[in-house]
Image (tube, grey):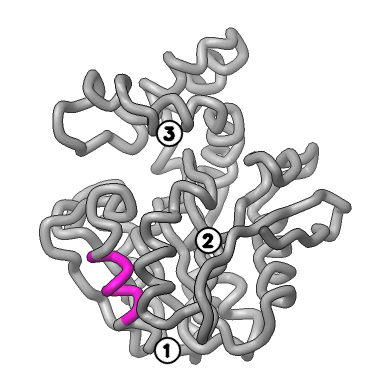
Amino acid sequence: MGIFTAADGTTLTYREVGEGPVVVIAHGLLATAEHWDSVAKPLAEQGFRVVVGNRRGREPSGALGADYSLATEISDLHLLLDDVGQGAALFGHSYGAWPALHVAAERDDLRSLVLYEPPPGEGKFGGAALPKVRAAVERGDLDEAMTILVTEVSPYEGQGGVAAYRATEMWRSQLALVPAAAEELGVIDAHVPDYPKYGSLSVPTTVFVGERSRGRRPFGTATAAVAAAIPGARLIELVGQGHLAHVEAPVLLAKHIADAVT
């Protein structure tokens, strides 16, 4: 496990596996670095050193902090990249795609950039569900808050629906992340995409969208807008996938990432 210190003094950690060219993964909501092991390991087997940042709000990294914002995530990701060395490929999934985009526009030492379904900003993601999520968190009812997140914000697409999901270890592991997710949702909804800034990107960029997401809200439409704003970006559809390929088809996703960064 790697450890570094954020600009505000918060301790941050990352997991790493493999040897070779570096691929840094920035994960999204309701996720930890450990949740990405099933992608990191097959990617490492293809000859990469895979570094997965454990974003703040997830142990053993520190708390989000009182002044948490997207700028916090951008600063943390810059420092993670500094810690692992120059020439990394950067992959951002969901919320992790937003800081990845900004970091890529602010530095010139990245080998490549890969994005997977960034969520919409400007109040179009959490929207009317966000106050309900926050109220449930304040009551201490994390199960109810989680239910709102996976039915009204980012609908769960897995086999058996939410009832089957609730019975899994993944659900139990994500409950502890719900308070952080409520704060992160507020940051996403406050975010106004900076399309002119994305238009300045010169790093080779690939954008993934799941077949089940393409053309649909919330992720498909936001992804298309981002891809259109980046000069020369390749938009690749992952056949049969939705937003959670890292859970449903991790080996397939690892292969696509390897192809994109090679």
Q: Residue furthest top?
A: 139
- Image-quadrant location for residue 170: top left
Characterize the local packing of mark 3: few (<14), some (14-19) or many (20 or more) Cα atoms within 10 angstroms: some
Q: Earlier in the sequence, mark 2 or mark 1?
A: 2
Q: Is residue 16 magenta?
A: no
Could you tell me which residue is drawn at 71 percent across and 46 percent down? 61
* Dot 2 amino acid type: Ala
Q: Is residue 256 magenta?
A: yes
Are the residues flagged by discs 2 and 3 in contact, CB closer than 8 Å?
Answer: no
* Dot 3 amino acid type: Gly
Could you tell me which residue is drawn at 53 percent across and 46 percent down? 32
Secondary structure beneath label 2: strand
Residue 256, position as x, y percentages in the image: 27, 74
Q: Tell me if residue 245 comes above or below residue 58 in the rendering.
A: below
* Dot 1 amino acid type: Pro
Which residue bears the numbered disc 3? 127
Which numbered disc, 3 or 1, marks the residue closer to the eye? 1
Residue 209, position as x, y percentages in the image: 25, 63
Q: Tell me if residue 227 comes above or below residue 223 in the rendering.
A: below
Q: Is residue 91 left or right of residue 52?
A: left
Which residue bears the numbered disc 1? 204
Which residue bears the numbered disc 2? 26
Residue 176, position as x, y percentages in the image: 56, 27
Numbered range of the magenta stretch:
252-258
Q: Quadrant of the C terminus?
A: bottom left
Q: Earlier in the sequence, mark 2 or mark 3?
A: 2
- Image-quadrant location for residue 53: bottom right
